[in-house]
Every structure is written in structure tokens, then in C-alpha cells.
Image (cartoon, rainbow, N blue to C red):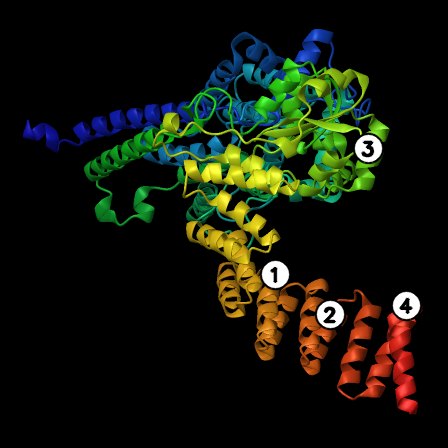
Amino acid sequence: MTGVFMKTSFWRKISYGMGYVVIGILLGLAVFQSNLEIKDLDLWLHIATGRFIVENGYVPSIDVLSYSIQGKPWINHEWVFQVLVYWIYQAGGADALLMMQAMVVAVTLCFLLLIGYSRERQILSVFLLLIVVLVYQMRFTIRPDIFSLLFFTLTIYIMSGHLDKRWSLYALFLIQVLWTNFHGFFFLGPLIILWGILDEFVKRHIRLPFEWNNVGRLTDGEYKRLKQIFGVVILACLFNPLTFEGAWYPIKVMVQLPSESKIFFEHIQELQRPVSLKTIFALDDALHYKLLIYFSALSFIFNFRMIDIGVFVFWLFFLAFSLMAKRNLVFFAFAAYLVCITNLMNIRLRDIVPLRFTHEKFRHMTSILFKIILCFWMIQYGLASANRSYFDFDTFERKSEFWGVSLRTYPNKAADFLIDHQAQGNFFNDFNSGAYLLGRCFPRIKVFIDGRTEVYGADFFRMYKKMWAEGDKEFLDKAIEQYHITGALLNSIQSEIPGNVLKYFFKKEGWAMVYFDYDAVIFLKDIPQNRKIIERFRIDLSQWKPPKMDLKRLGARNVTPFPQTSRAYTLEVLGFDEAALIEAQEALKMSPAYLEPYKIMGKIFGKRKEYEKAFENFRIATMLSPFNREVRYNLALAYSDLGDWEGAVKQYKRIIQFEPNNPKGYFHLSKAYAKRKEYKEALEAVGQAHRLDSSDVVDLLKIGDIIYEQGDFKSAQQVYEMALATGKDQANIHNKLGLCFQSLKQPQEAKDHYRKGLAIDPHHSELKENLRKLEIGVEK
């Protein structure tokens, strides 16, 4: 028996067997993670569109979902996906959609594994694939992306191992036709094949260093087949409802996005850049994505003599593609996996590891140990994920974050209200609610905006931001009249409603609040079609009685009382502070260590000038979340309101430690120093703020005014000169500098500044008066 254990073949078999176990657990983990509850916003837009296509029998080429862009050309390159998810949702609901996603994920990973699998290098394939899965799970969102990744993988699979087969041409044609009607990233299919052609052309006609000309070379037959395939997949792209226009559209959008749609990249999370030059080596964010960047880059270094130039260009493209937006990370993850496998195929272990560690039996024993560790880690990761849940306040039970639809992502109850009472018309809504409203309420309700950024365009999105984020009355008035808006759903399920837009609808004559809860506020215009709902459900917040929680039923369960704090924020914005306080206090009864109620109460007491109570609440909030910038600022302001400028200085210094590149911290610190009459320190702090933000003139003038009013005219002059360098509000700044020089008994310098100010603004009355008084005084 001892002899068996000593044999290399025994350990080899155990190692291979463990490899299959690890692969099984990895695929199981991926399938399990893909059943995370539905949270995606755009899914509901796809369901609504799929319903329209099925019920009407055609794919619309103009917008039919929104009243604000009704009739605008719409190239819908996802229609097959939309019909598919609508049918599945109708047949089996949300869980059926999750099962579909799990199947797509499993098939995609199986083909990805097959591309890079080698029994001799099981551990490499599995380890890299595990990191890919940890990135991949970011896109487990039931979007067309998951099919795009499947078609991407199938294309690579056929090209890498079956190009010599006759069926490859027909298979790639079929894949491309499906891809063209599932997702706009179908342009990647022809692009990958074109890379293969150009790569082979370069290797045949250009002298490359080392062995690069010979790596990955195709036979003449394969090269000819690849050219044929390219023509076939280009033809396949034309198989869409709009033929040439539909085939060209994704390229057109890709070209236009960087220049015309910068605003989308700034405000939509999935379009934001995943890393910057400052965070590329930080391991606290997008860790697994960064690991794949490092590993794939190192694979080229280790394999520098045998680099496939086509693979290198492939890697560079998908790296750049992923750096453009977070939603593209998974494509790079797949590409990085393929690149690592390709490069490391040419490298032996003894090339990078000392010889004494490369004995075959020792390698198999080490591999078994590593595979066991991987198994335990994946099982532990899966078990930890399985415990994710949250409290459902309607059922008094915890809901798992797996299966079903999220209760904390959508305004579920508000949509139920609209459906139950058959509300209809053109509704104003926020960006995050549009798709959900369409999925639940279309066609009775049409939306102002949804997730189709390329259809609405950058100019429309800017107008929307003015309306939603700023509550611009002029824009809102114009939109209500122009688009005949009859209702408004203001979503508060994930963040507070911006105060100005909330107050606009609350105060607008002829509008009534008919729904108010933690997930949204609904207003209806008082017109005949809404009258029954308004008469039955009109809400008078002055009579609002916050619902009491049954604490006995709740028991000792640790919950997050977000419904109470969400309502409290809305009530506070609208001026119903007493009701907001009751909601906040109710939240604290449920969870005394919850941060949000203290923030709300501190703000209300601050408004009431009850500064001691405001300080007490902000102090507790800071204790609960010491690294939260907002609460730390509030605590500093509470110190300021109490006249304790020393305490304020300490808090602002802490804020600067957290955010050394945030100019606001330095501005506030400078103000606190100025109030303490520590002008040297105030000038140092404001100078640093000005270096970080050379355009902020408002804060500079505030600090200069404080110092001027306290009589240090020389220091005030220095602050005003910083403000002058911003190039803003020049006439006003020259006036302030004139006053400084006048107080410093330098009348000529004062007169020069008054005259410069008047040259900029001849109608500035204060400048005229100050210059007149100065000239009279000089003459006397």
C-alpha cells in the first residue's frame, strides 16, 4: 500500500479528480450567484417592449413608450431578447427569468472553460476562471449583455479550435444573426474575425521580432475560410428589422458617445470609468478586475519571445474598452482569461519556478492542496452569499436576496397603487423609475424618461437634470404644458427626492398628493380623468399620522428602519418637521444605533436654532459613522452654531485627513480660523483650497468678508486678490479691494480699483458711491 502512495501516477489521478470537483463547485457557485434577486432597472423596459411587439406584431422603428420623445426614430437592436424575456416572464414570473439567466451563465462558462482547458493545467484554468466569475457576477442582471457574452465566447470557441471545419461558417453566421438582434455589441463579432485576418496578414508579410511571425499561424485553407467567414458575418449583421441602418447603428453610437454624451458617463453609474490613474494600483475597489489586468499583462512579459501579435492587440482593445465604462468590465475579464491561457501555454513551470519544486509528484501533491483550498474558499463564499437577506416590513419576515424581485430597488408599492386604481396619462418621473413604470404600467402610463440614453440624447438628459436635480421651475412649467403631463411619480426608494422638485409639485396649484410612503410620492393633476382618485386619496400632510411599529411583533430583531427615515426626509423637506421628528423617533425605537434618524433630527433642531440638541444628534451620528463626510461636516457646523470655533477647527481637520484633495474642507477650515481671528492659518487654508479649486469665488468672498469685518484689512486684501484671479464677479471684487485699500489709508490704490470696477460695470451703484466719497475726501 505504501508503494501505491509513492507512485506518481496515484497523485496524478487524485489531482485530476480534484480538478473535476473544483470545476463542478465553480460552475455551481456561478449558477447560484446568478440567481440573485432581480434588481436591474432596464429589464422592465425590455419586458414592456416585448409585450408591445408580441401584442402588435411588429418591431417599432419609432418611440412608442415615452410621451416626451414620441415618434422619434428608435433603432431597437435588442428586440429578440425583449420578446424572449416577456414570454418567459408571462409563463413563469421572475424566478423563470432567473433560471434563464443561470442557464446562459452556465453554458457561457462551460465554453469558456473548454477554450482554455488542459488537464495538465487544471489549476491555472480554474483559478483564472474563478476570478472571471467574481467579475462576471457584476452583470448577473438579466440584460442582453449576458447573451452578448455567450455569443462572444461561442465565436472565440469556434475560431480557436474549429476553423478548419466546414460547419464553422454556418455556425458563425447563425450566431451573428442572433447576436445582431439580441444586443448592440454584435459589432464585436465581425471585429474579432477582422482581427484574425489582419493578424495573419501581418505575420505573413511583416518581419516581427523573436518568434512572433510563427506563433498562431493559420494554414492557407484556414486563412481562406476566415476571409469567407468575415463576409458571411457582415452579411448576417444585415438580418435585422432595419437592415443597413440597424447594422451601422452601434458603430454610430460608439463614435458619438465620447463627444456628445459625456453627461451620461458623469451621472449614470454603469457608464462611469471603473478605475483612474490614481486608483489603478489600489486594491480596495474593482479588485478582481485589476488582478486580471496584472496577471494578463505579466503573461505577456513571461511569454515575450512567443507573443501572438493578434492576441496582444485583442488584449489592448478590450482593456481600453473596459476602461471606458464599468459595464464593459466582463468583456475584458473574458479576454484576459483567454490571453493568460494563450500565453501560458508556451511557458513551462520550471521557467518561472526553481527546479527543486517542479518534480512531478510534488507538483501533483501541491496542486491537490491548492484545489482543496479553492474548494473550501468557494463553498465558504457561497454560504456567506446565501445568508444575504433583509427585513420585509409588510410580512415581518426576512427576504433572501436570492430569487424573486427586490423590494428595495423599485417603487413597488407606488406602482401597485397606480395599477390598482387604474391611473393613466403622461407621468413625470426620475431616470431610475422610467423603465420600471413601463414594465408595470404601460400602456396606461407613459413616461418622461427611461434608460434609453442613446434615444433621448444628451440635450434632453441635461434638461431632465435641470428639472429633477435642481427643480428648475421654468423647465418644469414648460414641460407640463408642452407634454400635457398629468401625473408625477417621485422615487425615494434608494435616495431622497431632491428638495426643489418635491416642493415644486407639492406647492403647484391644481395638483394633489395622492400617495406618500417610503418608496415614492405621487402627485396627480386635478383634471377629470384623475378626479376620482384625488377625491378618494388626497393627502393632507398637516394631518399626517406616522404609522406606529408593532415593537412586540418585531421583537429583538436587528432591522434597518429605512421606511420611517425615508418618510421623515420627505416630511422635513416639505416643512412638516414635527411629523418628521416623530418618524425619526419611531425609527430609533426600532434601531437605536441607526445613523439616519440622528441626521434628520440634528437638521431639524438646527433649523429651530436649538443648537445644543442639534449638536447632540450630530455628535451621535458621527460616533456611529466616524468616516462619513456628511455627518462630520454637520458636527462641525453644530460646533460653529454654538460659537465653539476650536471644536469646528478640529472637525474640519479630520475631514481634510479623510479627503485631502477636497477644497471644501479647506474653505470651511479657513472660515473657522478666520472666526477665531487666526488669520495666518486662515490664509494658509484658503490658499490650499484655491489651489485645489481655482474657480470657486463664492467661498473666497465669504472668507474675505469675515476677515474684513473683523478689521484685518491686509489679510482680507490677500483673499480678495485670490478671488480676482478666478476671473469671476470682477466688478464686485474690485469694489471690495477698493474698500480694503481705503481702510489701509492707500487712497490711490483704492481709487484705481473703483475705476477698474466701473470700467467692467459702469452701472454698479456701490462702486460709484465709494469712488465719489473717496474723491471728495481726497479733495478735502
Q: Amino acid at mark 1?
A: Lys
| Residues packed near mark 4 inside 10 Å, few (<14), some (14 to 19) or many (20 plus) | some
Mark earlier in primary sequence (4, 3): 3
Instruction: Identify the mark at residue 761; answer none if there is no mark.
Output: 4
Residue at the spot of label 3: 479
Determine the CA span between mark 1 and mark 3: 35 Å
Q: Residue at x 55, y 14 (%)?
A: 167
The answer to whether marks 4 and 3 mark residues whose Cβ atoms lie closer than 8 Å is no
Q: Nearer the viewer, residue 224 or 476?
A: 476
Q: Residue at x 17, y 32 (%)?
A: 8
Quadrant in which the C terminus appears: bottom right
Q: Amino acid at mark 3?
A: Ala
When the figure is inspected, residue 155 is found, relative to residue 470, above or below; the finding is: above
Residue at the spot of label 2: 723
Q: Amino acid at mark 2?
A: Ala
The answer to whether marks 2 and 4 mark residues whose Cβ atoms lie closer than 8 Å is no
Task: Say whether residue 396 is left or right of residue 183.
Answer: left
The x and y percentages for residue 520 are 62, 30
Mark earlier in primary sequence (1, 4): 1
Instruction: Identify the mark at residue 664; answer none if there is no mark.
Output: 1
